[in-house]
């Protein structure tokens, strides 16, 4: 795609006088029912069972663990991400349905933490994914995890006024930046089964920064998605 | 990878197919993956796929000061971090030719056994959850939290208590701590009946766990299995008895064993070990007030501390099995080489692959949790 194309983001203004009330109501409902996919990438996973079970009880906030990315709203990255894991994290994130939120737990997701000089880990998570809330600490206590989730809930609830709960839109708006960092780490032949540019068009979130030299590189190697043939053979 | 670039495995004239479990899967312990070749729901071949948690620990340790590494080592095994710092301190002490004072040794024993209790409670919960019983999971995690509260009180850290240094421990116990520990042990013993009724004699669990993932004694020794998994095969081997370290030779405890080597035997060994740990902790409570003296020997300024040339191999019995550190020093302020011999890489890779063969798909999670492997320790 060419850079000269001036693409304007679709206007999000609503004309219906009651739209604001509906939007607020919808975001209120969204903030009260969140399904969380916890990708146990590192040490922080050990503090999630106490936070989820009877002592700290995350469920009273309307947050429940979910096992599949397709049905989850929150992606919890618990700790350092090695390069091998980061590929799976990005794959998981791109499979999730919008609106989706990312929480980075532990200092390692903020800036590398203890492993700042390690050859095997990715240092800053928000270079590869848009992160909504960071919970620092090595490792953060369950109270801190719950505090972070509360903050995310407030951000979602007040999204229309404060514009803090929509980091996921940034992934579509600045896809070239994120893809560039991913290509820098994984090599130029990096691709995922999801089509982010088509999704950006669908949501009306494509901007100038969606395209760039990195997406050009992706289009060179990428083929359109085709249904896959079943390869299982039955016994004669 | 796009699906059209994915070369599906071409199989012969069979109805075998391949599925992936993990790394993000509720039936996998931590960030670990497993590739299965299935015929119906019987596993033909299982291949472990580790490396998701690799941080290059042994390389990182070569770049940091001796004292800085103490903050790094507990991160190797997250559910059971205390043995890591103890065994690293023991190895450095051996090179230096110093010995921790007796009071420090008793405190270390207390820390190790508390950590073992916490790790086993966590395992009960995890193992029960893989058979669809979620109440023991809630109980196990809640009871483990009481142990973590004690850790927080005497070390300052909930999970990672960087409490040991070469030459002793860092802080004296707070006032009235042993009293609180005694109350906790009373509470845990009072829970024995509940756990037995709900989990260990519950037919829902017993029928799933019996004859699942059976490991013979010969295979166990060949595969390098240690710890409770080896004792479940009937071999009475425990480093606390066979090669005593710290003050374990003065303590009175038994080594629980089982004969069958299946998942049920493994969890029973852990259950008995938990109560042996309580027995040890009771002896510590009795003995510790009568041991006076310093909690650490004097060591040089840690920021410019050159450990003299030498090498040492220290090993302890962690809740997962034999844990050892091989440390080499060339007289500099940083280690020359550190090697970690963790128990989990034997359990999670070769033993799991061995046991998965012929098992059924629904038992994979249970076999993995019954081996109590710790993925961060596999990859390091």
Image (cartoon, rainbow, N blue to C red):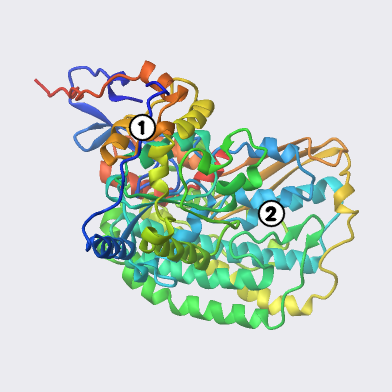
Image quarter hosting the N terminus of chain A: top left
Q: Which mark is residue B85?
A: 2
Residue at the spot 25% in from the left edge and 17% down from the top edge: B10
Q: Position of residue B342 (x, y in %)?
A: 59, 43
Residue at the spot 70% in from the left edge and 52% down from the top edge: B71
Kindly report the distance in space between the C-alpha atoms of the residues bearing marks 2 and 1.
57 Å
- Side of B268 where B197 appears, left or right: left
Q: Which chain does tag 2 point to?
A: B
Image quarter hosting the C terminus of chain A: top left
Q: Which mark is residue B171?
A: none
Q: How many marks?
A: 2
Residue at the spot 69% in from the left edge and 35% down from the top edge: B59
Front residue of this view, candidates B186 and B57: B57
Front residue of this view, candidates B365 and A179: A179
Q: Position of residue A234 (x, y in %)?
A: 12, 24
Residue B361: image quadrant is top left
Tell me, yes or no, if residue B352 can be seen here: no
Q: Secondary structure at mark 2?
A: helix
- In this rendering, do the residues under marks 2 and 1 share a single chain? no
- Side of B64 where A12 appears, left or right: left
Q: According to the image, label 1 marks what residue?
A: A7
Position above or below: B220 against A146: above
Tell me, yes or no, if residue A14 can be seen here: yes
- Side of B253 where A217 appears, left or right: left
Residue A89: image quadrant is top left
For disc 1, the neighbor class at 10 Å (few under 14, some 14 to 19, many from 20) is few
Give the mark toward the camera: 2 or 1. Answer: 1
For disc 2, the neighbor class at 10 Å (few under 14, some 14 to 19, many from 20) is many
Residue B8: image quadrant is top left
Position above or below: A88 against B199: above
């Amino acid at each position: 795609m060419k850079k000269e194309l001036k693409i304007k983001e679709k206007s999000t203004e609503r004309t219906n006088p009651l739209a604001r009330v509906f939007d607020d109501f919808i975001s209120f409902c969204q903030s009260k029912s969140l399904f969380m996919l916890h990708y146990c990438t590192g040490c922080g996973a050990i503090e999630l069972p106490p936070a989820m079970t009877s002592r700290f009880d995350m469920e009273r906030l309307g947050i429940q663990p979910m096992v599949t990315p397709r049905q989850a709203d929150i992606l919890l990255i618990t700790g350092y991400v090695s390069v091998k894991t980061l590929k799976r994290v990005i794959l998981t994130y791109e499979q999730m349905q919008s609106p989706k939120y990312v929480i980075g737990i532990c200092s390692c997701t903020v800036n590398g933490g203890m492993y700042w000089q390690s050859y095997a880990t990715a240092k800053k998570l928000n270079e590869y994914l848009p992160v909504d809330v960071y919970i620092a600490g090595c490792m953060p206590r369950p109270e801190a995890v719950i505090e972070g989730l509360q903050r995310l809930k407030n951000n979602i609830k007040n999204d229309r006024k404060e514009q803090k709960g929509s980091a996921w839109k940034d992934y579509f708006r600045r896809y070239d930046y994120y893809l560039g960092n991913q290509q820098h780490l994984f090599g130029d032949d990096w691709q995922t089964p999801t089509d982010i540019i088509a999704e950006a068009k669908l949501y009306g979130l494509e901007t100038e920064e969606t395209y760039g030299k990195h997406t050009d590189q992706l289009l060179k190697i990428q083929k359109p998605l085709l249904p896959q043939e079943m390869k299982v053979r039955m016994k004669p | 990878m796009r699906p059209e670039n994915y070369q599906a495995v071409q199989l012969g004239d069979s109805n075998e197919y391949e599925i992936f479990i993990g790394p993000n899967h509720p039936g996998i312990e931590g960030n670990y993956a497993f590739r299965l070749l299935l015929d119906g729901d019987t596993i033909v071949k299982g291949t472990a796929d580790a490396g998701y948690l690799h941080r290059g620990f042994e390389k990182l340790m070569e770049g940091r000061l001796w004292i800085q590494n103490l903050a790094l080592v507990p991160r190797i095994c997250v559910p059971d971090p205390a043995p890591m710092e103890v065994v690293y301190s023991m190895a450095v002490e051996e090179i230096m030719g110093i010995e921790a004072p007796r009071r420090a040794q008793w405190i270390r024993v207390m820390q190790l056994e508390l950590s073992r209790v916490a790790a086993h409670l966590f395992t009960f919960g995890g193992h029960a959850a893989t058979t669809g019983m979620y109440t023991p999971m809630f109980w196990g995690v809640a009871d483990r939290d009481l142990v973590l509260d004690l850790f927080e009180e005497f070390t300052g850290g909930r999970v990672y208590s960087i409490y040991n240094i070469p030459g002793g421990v860092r802080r004296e116990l707070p006032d009235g701590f042993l009293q609180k520990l005694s109350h906790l042990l009373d509470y845990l013993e009072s829970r024995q009946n509940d756990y037995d009724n709900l989990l260990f004699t519950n037919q829902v669990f017993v029928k799933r766990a019996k004859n699942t993932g059976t490991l013979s004694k010969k295979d166990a020794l060949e595969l390098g299995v240690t710890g409770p998994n080896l004792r479940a095969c009937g071999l009475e081997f425990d480093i606390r008895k066979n090669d005593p370290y710290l003050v374990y030779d003065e303590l009175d405890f038994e080594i629980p064993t089982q004969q069958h080597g299946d998942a049920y035997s493994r969890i029973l060994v852990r259950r008995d070990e938990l109560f042996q740990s309580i027995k040890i902790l009771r002896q510590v409570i009795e003995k510790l007030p009568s041991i006076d003296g310093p909690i650490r020997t004097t060591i040089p300024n840690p920021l410019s501390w050159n450990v003299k040339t030498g090498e040492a191999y220290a090993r302890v019995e962690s809740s997962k099995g034999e844990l050892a550190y091989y440390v080499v020093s060339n007289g500099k302020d940083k280690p020359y080489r550190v090697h970690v011999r963790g128990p989990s890489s034997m359990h999670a890779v070769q033993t799991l692959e061995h046991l998965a063969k012929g098992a059924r798909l629904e038992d994979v999670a249970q076999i993995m949790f019954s081996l109590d492997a710790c993925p961060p320790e596999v990859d390091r």
